[in-house]
Image (cartoon, rainbow, N blue to C red):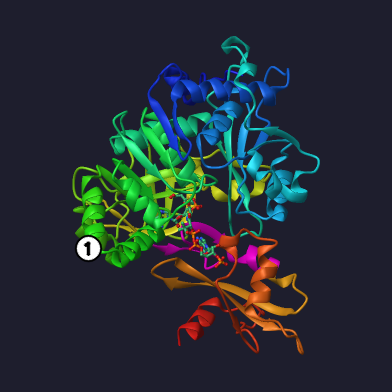
């Protein structure tokens, strides 16, 4: 349906590239042009539509490996008028089942090699193979018109209330991001982005993949992050986007390499037009070490699932280590105290056309996420320096952690650990760590007489949670420090863990 804001610029942008023979994706199987991706996307659209005229925003799950097929499935669902919900093989069936239930997913587009990871979550879902024949392609005229305000993507993000929430991003939200991030970072068809980020989050999917494709650039999609492979592939890239943990890993691999390899790798890093860091704070020491090899400090920027990139250091101009730079041209920011009044240091608020519309099926959480006049509360504490560069000082909630760039809810992890019969009490905290940002630690009081150990508890958690949410360490306590109301004192726990 076309709405008051017109048709989807995301899809008109895609259609304008659809006849191009330029290479859009290079994966481990070879190169694909925009034209061939578009033909396959139309075949997927026909398969998910099944004779209907439009999916009218219906949520469709994507459990597709990170290669050209992923892009075909993504645009196939959008061309059919659907909303993409990205699933991940990093999730156990219990978590996939939760996401599908919450999003009311009825159809999943699946890579044949990932079907088994659906497990019990697959029962009751219609499964469409990502490799449907291009001969099925729906003619251009048969595809529905999709409006700018239609939902395009539902990304799951952890919050302070237990289970992850589905942030609904419209076609216009994504089109604005493609345009403004592309402009800010000077993305062009001459770029070749090296991509090793997971595709079930904002960074890998929108900030990296969609922005590059929207600019007509080529994306080298790696099946997963592997430091040596990334170094080798950098020689063919102009652009690289990563989370801080990846820079830490790259520097470790560099230090372990022989001198000739180091020289070669450093040459590739120096030849890059742009290397960005985001999703978590880049430790200044790590950024400086990268700069000593690559000749320039990574462009650090701030983003969120609900916003996309909000602020960035400039590509041309001064990059200030330890800051996330200046607001993008589409973004307004405010820094406010607890009463919502302007303050030198306080919560960062963001407003603008890239900000999401709602948490799916959670009107109360949506209302709470916004302050007056459409300001989105980020939950980050920030301050601005004299030149307008913003510095992120931390989160307003001790229960939101960032590990390797993934946002995690301590409460969600605690709930799962509490299901183990030998756990009497549990509190999950993030211990500051240069490699991970927050290292997730479970502080556990075991039931009397139990013979629980760290590995048993981690294995138990892995059957219920994505691997990256599973605490890296378990520390045993006789009792947890609590206040008079019985609430666990997490700052006190962290102090004890440090001592
Ligand atoms: C992997 N592991 C993690 C982890 N990633 N544990 C905690 N936190 C993480 N982030 C676990 C593995 O399951 C494994 O567990 C062990 O660590 C070693 O695995 P590995 O193979 O060494 O790790 P690897 O798979 O290489 O993963 C590291 C990583 C990955 C940095 C590549 O974490 C990653 O891709 N992070 C990106 C997250 C991201 O894209 N966030 C964007 C959110 S959007 P075990 O038990 O087997 O030892 C956003 C908006 C914005 O934030 O601004 O961008
Ligand atoms: P997510 O919900 O996964 O999109 O994570 C968004 C959160 O990541 C933000 O609210 C910040 O806490 C954090 N974040 C993103 N980029 C940065 C950065 N450059 N520095 C510090 N924190 C960041």
Of residues 136 and 151, the one nearer the viewer is: 136
Say above or below: 112 vs 481: above
Quarter-of-image position of residue 183: top left
- Say if the magenta span includes residue 408: yes
Q: Mark 1 = which residue?
A: 259
Residue that protrudes farthest toward the right in the picture? 124
The tally of labels here is 1
Say above or below: 26 vs 54: below
The magenta region covers 393-416
- Say if the magenta span includes residue 71: no
**What percent of the width, then of the height, locates residue 186?**
28, 35
Residue that protrudes farthest toward the top in the picture? 141
Of residues 79 and 366, the one nearer the viewer is: 79
- Residue 321: in sight, yes or no? no
Q: Quadrant of the C terminus?
A: bottom left
Say above or below: 287 vs 14: below
Quarter-of-image position of residue 265: bottom left
Q: Residue at x 43, y 18 (%)?
A: 16
**What percent of the width, then of the height, locates residue 44?**
62, 25
Provide the secondary structure element on which disc 1 rests. Answer: helix
Q: Residues within 10 Å of mark 1 (few under 14, many from 20)?
A: few
**What percent of the width, then of the height, locates residue 108?**
69, 37
Question: Is 491 left or right of 420, judged from the image as shown?
Answer: left
Q: Residue at x 48, y 61 (%)?
A: 402
Of residues 250 and 423, the one nearer the viewer is: 250
- Residue 119: in sight, yes or no? yes
């Amino acid at each position: 349906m076309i709405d008051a804001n017109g048709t989807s610029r995301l899809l008109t942008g895609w259609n304008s590239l659809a006849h191009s023979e330029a290479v859009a994706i290079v994966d481990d199987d070879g190169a694909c042009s925009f034209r061939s991706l578009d033909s396959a996307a139309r075949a997927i659209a026909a398969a998910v539509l099944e004779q209907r005229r439009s999916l009218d925003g219906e949520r469709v799950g994507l459990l597709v490996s990170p290669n050209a097929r992923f892009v075909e499935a993504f645009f196939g669902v959008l061309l059919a008028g659907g909303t993409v919900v990205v699933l991940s093989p990093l999730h156990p069936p219990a978590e996939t089942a939760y996401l599908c239930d919450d999003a009311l997913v009825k159809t999943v587009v699946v890579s044949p090699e990932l079907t088994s990871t659906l497990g019990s979550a697959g029962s009751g879902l219609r499964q469409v193979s990502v490799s449907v024949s291009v001969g099925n392609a729906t003619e251009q005229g048969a595809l529905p018109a999709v409006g700018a305000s239609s939902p395009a993507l539902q990304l799951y993000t952890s919050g302070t209330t237990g289970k992850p929430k589905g942030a609904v991003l419209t076609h216009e939200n994504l089109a604005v991001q493609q345009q403004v991030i592309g402009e800010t970072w000077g993305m062009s068809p001459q770029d070749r982005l090296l991509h090793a980020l997971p595709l079930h989050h904002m960074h890998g999917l929108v900030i990296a993949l969609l922005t590059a494709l929207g600019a007509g650039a080529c994306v080298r999609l790696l099946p997963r992050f592997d430091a040596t492979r990334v170094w080798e592939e950098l020689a063919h890239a102009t652009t690289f986007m990563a989370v801080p943990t990846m820079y830490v890993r790259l520097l470790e691999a560099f230090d372990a390499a022989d001198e000739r390899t180091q020289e070669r790798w450093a040459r590739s890093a120096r030849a890059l037009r742009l290397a960005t860091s985001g999703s978590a704070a880049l430790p200044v020491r790590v950024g400086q070490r990268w700069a000593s090899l690559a000749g320039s400090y990574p462009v650090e920027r701030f983003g969120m699932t609900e916003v996309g990139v909000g602020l960035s250091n400039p590509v041309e101009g001064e990059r200030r280590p330890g800051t996330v730079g200046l607001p993008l041209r589409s973004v307004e920011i405010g820094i406010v105290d607890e009463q919502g009044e302007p303050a030198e240091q306080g919560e960062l608020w963001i407003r603008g056309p890239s900000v999401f519309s709602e948490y799916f099926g959670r009107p109360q959480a949506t209302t709470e996420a916004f302050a007056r006049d459409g300001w989105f509360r980020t939950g980050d504490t920030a301050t601005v320096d004299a030149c307008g560069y913003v510095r992120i000082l931390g989160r307003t909630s001790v229960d939101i952690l960032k590990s390797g760039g993934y946002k995690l809810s301590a409460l969600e992890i605690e709930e799962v650990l509490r299901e183990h019969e030998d756990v009497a009490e549990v509190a999950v905290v993030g211990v500051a760590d240069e490699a991970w940002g927050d290292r997730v630690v479970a502080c556990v009081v075991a039931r009397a007489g139990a013979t629980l150990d760290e590995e048993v508890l981690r294995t138990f958690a892995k059957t219920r949670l994505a691997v990256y949410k599973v605490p890296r360490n378990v520390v045993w306590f006789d009792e947890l420090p609590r206040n008079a109301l019985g609430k666990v004192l997490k700052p006190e726990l962290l102090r004890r863990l440090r001592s």
